[in-house]
Amino acid sequence: MNYYILTYGCQMNVSDSERLAAQLEKKGHKPVKEIKLANLIVINACSVRQSAINRVYGKIKILNERKPKPKIILTGCILEKDKKKLKDRVNEIWPVADFQTKPKCKSSSEAFLPIMSGCNNFCSYCVVPYTRGRESSRPAREIIKEIKNLISSRYKEITLLGQNVNSYKDKTKKINFQKLLKLICALPGDFQIKFLTSHPKDMSDKLIRIIAQNKKISKEIHLAIQSGDNKILKAMNRKYTAEDCQKLIKKIRRAIPQAKLSTDIIVGFPSETEKQFQNTVKIVRKNNFYQIYAAAYSPRPNTAAAKLKDDVHFMEKKRRKNIILSLRQNK
């Protein structure tokens, strides 16, 4: 069958799609460049944001109206609620793509490599612990082996992926994220390492030093601060304050003057006032993030925040989101 993969969501889903493509081709399916030429369509979805899952619902409706109707497979970070609603509209639902399949990378120079999956933080707005489960780290030896293969295949940029990548831990070998980075940097070859996504509470002084000291580690650092207001951060269950974030950013800029920082921001969290939003604006203005990924809050089933009243009007969320996006340096 001719296949086409639609990917929604974060880089973890992009990586899963690359591995899924390799798995499909191993079974004899052939890729096509246009969705209209495919009779097998895989939708790699994401329930993390309502807007993303809304697009999935709309796309499935359009595909089901196509003649001849293609075979539709659904996979990805999907809540049980969404699976139940979609099960009669697709042919099959697959679990998240297996880590072990060697990816078919779209770029000839850039590769995405999952090193861990899931999350133990239970931020009040996030469904990741419910869609991908608790944190699970891949064995370091497997990661090193795969990176060696990527280097020998002349990949120049390798991005390590995880919902909370800097909490990686190979317990059997007692290898944490800092030690893993050292092992990777010791490999011969002309390549650069990036990683996504970092939780501010796990960005240690030691990790900052390792980034500063190793030329093979990119100085582009993503810190998902989410909000600049302490009351909102507490309601989000982020386990740090705005002051903690500011101190951390100062440490990074002191140790790595050339660092390019990016961040995630959520606007319109339940009960967020204009004053609290302006606290976020202040921390964003102060730190000159070269890139900002802003999202309007949407309640997700099973999360603690879903029990709160979603009391910020969607037009106000849109206004706040546009203000935050206007502050990024890389426009």
Image (cartoon, rainbow, N blue to C red):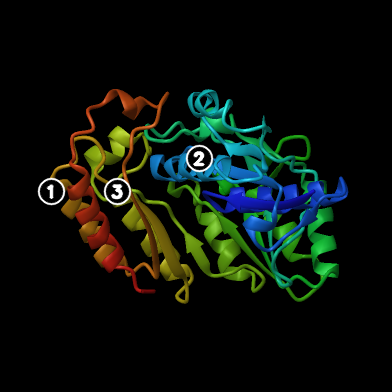
Disc 3 + disc 2, Cβ < 8 Å: no
Label 1 Cα crowd, 10 Å radius (few <14 / some 14-19 / many 20+): few
- What amino acid is found at the position of numbered circle 1 in the picture? Glu
- Which residue in the protein does label 1 denote? 274
**Residue 227, which numbered label?**
3
Report how far apart the C-alphas of labels 1 and 3 lie in the structure. 13 Å
Give the quarter of the image for residue 70.
top right
- Disc with the residue nearer the chain's start (3 vs 2): 2
Q: Residue 216 at x, y = what percent?
A: 67, 71
Residue type, mark 2 in image = Lys
Which element carries disc 1, helix, strand or loop? helix
Residue 22 lies, with reference to residue 269, above or below; the image says: below
x and y percentages locating residue 267 in the rendered image: 27, 48
Quadrant of residue 209 within the rendered picture: bottom right
Q: Is residue 255 left or right of residue 272?
A: right
Q: Residue at x 55, y 27 (%)?
A: 83
Q: Nearer the viewer, mark 1 or mark 2?
A: 2
Which amino acid does the dot numbered 3 rest on?
Ser
The residue at which mark 2 appears reads as: 61
Work out whether residue 222 or residue 250 is closer to the camera in this orientation and state it. 222
Q: Earlier in the sequence, mark 1 or mark 3?
A: 3
**Residue 20 location (% of width, % of height):** 73, 47
**Which SS class for mark 3?**
loop
**Secondary structure state at the residue bearing disc 2:** helix
Looking at the image, is mark 3 or mark 2 nearer the viewer?
2
Q: Earlier in the sequence, mark 1 or mark 2?
A: 2
Q: Position of residue 122 (x, y in %)?
A: 45, 31
Q: Which mark is residue 298?
A: none
